Image (cartoon, rainbow, N blue to C red):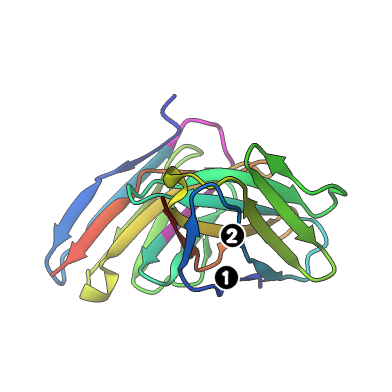
């Protein structure tokens, strides 16, 4: 079972470059999430999508855009990368049902120089 | 908005001993779930245990148990009989099941198990 697949796993960008992080899940989940993880800060929510066609800002949305392309895919775009966006990015998905956990991708380690 | 607080500094625990990781949360939602995840040094997020806000009994999963005190908004994780492989970051998380059901995380607790 693939679960949640994120690509790429590693990326180095120059300041000002753009890129899109891809995420796909094969569990028919309604909700999808993008987080960033920085040392000592835990996982901070960037954007969230409760269902296909809907997206909401999370705790740290500035500098990012998202697209919920369909039920399976939720992409995160950095239009003009900044060194402050150096981080590990996680995509996750879940159902809305009580008692069900979120499943995570393997993470993308992004460095902006 | 939900807020999850994990304030303990890094913890060292002797192998085979128990360790308790504190988590408090703040929410106005009545129906919600609490989750604990483990993140080893390899980086993946591993789900450990779940507690629903209406569950009357504390959740248990093998060596993991959750000490849930709803009135105090506390959901502490207890790891019994620690093993070297338990060395990791541990994150507490919360999700409401109606309305705003985004998943919010605390900052984590670092645990190092020593032989």
Mark 2 surroundings within 10 Å by alpha-carbon count, few (fewer than 14), some (14 through 19), many (20 or more): many
**The N terminus of chain B, quarter of image:** bottom right
Mark 1 surroundings within 10 Å by alpha-carbon count, few (fewer than 14), some (14 through 19), many (20 or more): many
Q: CA distance from mark 2 to mark 1?
A: 8 Å
- The residue indicated by pointer 1 is B6
The magenta region covers A25-35
Q: Position of residue A3 (x, y in %)?
A: 45, 32
For image coordinates 54% across by 73% down, the residue present is B8
Q: Is residue B84 left or right of residue B80?
A: left
Dot 2 or dot 1: first in sequence order is 1
Is B81 one of the magenta-colored residues?
A: no
SS under mark 2: strand
Q: Are marks 2 and 1 on the same chain?
A: yes
Q: Decide if residue A52 is in sight here.
A: no
Q: Is residue B24 above or below residue B84?
A: below
- The residue indicated by pointer 2 is B92
For image coordinates 67% across by 45% down, the residue present is A96
Q: Are marks 2 and 1 in contact (CB under 8 Å)?
A: yes
Q: Is residue B78 above or below residue A15?
A: above
Q: Quadrant of residue A98?
A: top right
């Amino acid at each position: 079972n693939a679960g949640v697949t994120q690509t790429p796993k590693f990326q180095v960008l120059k300041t000002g470059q753009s890129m899109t992080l891809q995420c796909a899940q094969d569990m028919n989940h309604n909700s999808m999430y993008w987080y960033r993880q920085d040392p000592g800060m835990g996982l901070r929510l960037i954007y969230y999508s409760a269902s296909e066609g809907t997206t909401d800002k999370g705790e740290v949305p500035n500098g990012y855009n998202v697209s919920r392309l369909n039920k399976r895919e939720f992409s995160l775009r950095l239009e003009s990368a900044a060194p402050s966006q150096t981080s590990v990015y996680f995509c996750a998905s879940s159902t809305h049902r009580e008692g069900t956990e979120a499943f995570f991708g393997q993470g993308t380690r992004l460095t902006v120089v | 908005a939900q807020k999850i607080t994990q304030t303990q500094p890094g913890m060292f625990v002797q192998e085979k001993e128990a360790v308790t990781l504190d988590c408090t949360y703040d929410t106005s939602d009545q129906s919600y779930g609490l989750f604990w995840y483990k993140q080893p040094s390899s980086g993946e997020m591993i789900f450990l245990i779940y507690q629903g806000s209406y569950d009357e009994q504390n959740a248990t999963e093998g060596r993991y148990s959750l000490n849930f005190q709803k009135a105090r908004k506390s959901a502490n994780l207890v790891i019994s009989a620690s093993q070297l492989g338990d060395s990791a970051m541990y994150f507490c998380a919360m999700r409401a099941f109606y309305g705003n059901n985004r998943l919010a995380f605390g900052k984590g607790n670092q645990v190092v198990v020593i032989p």
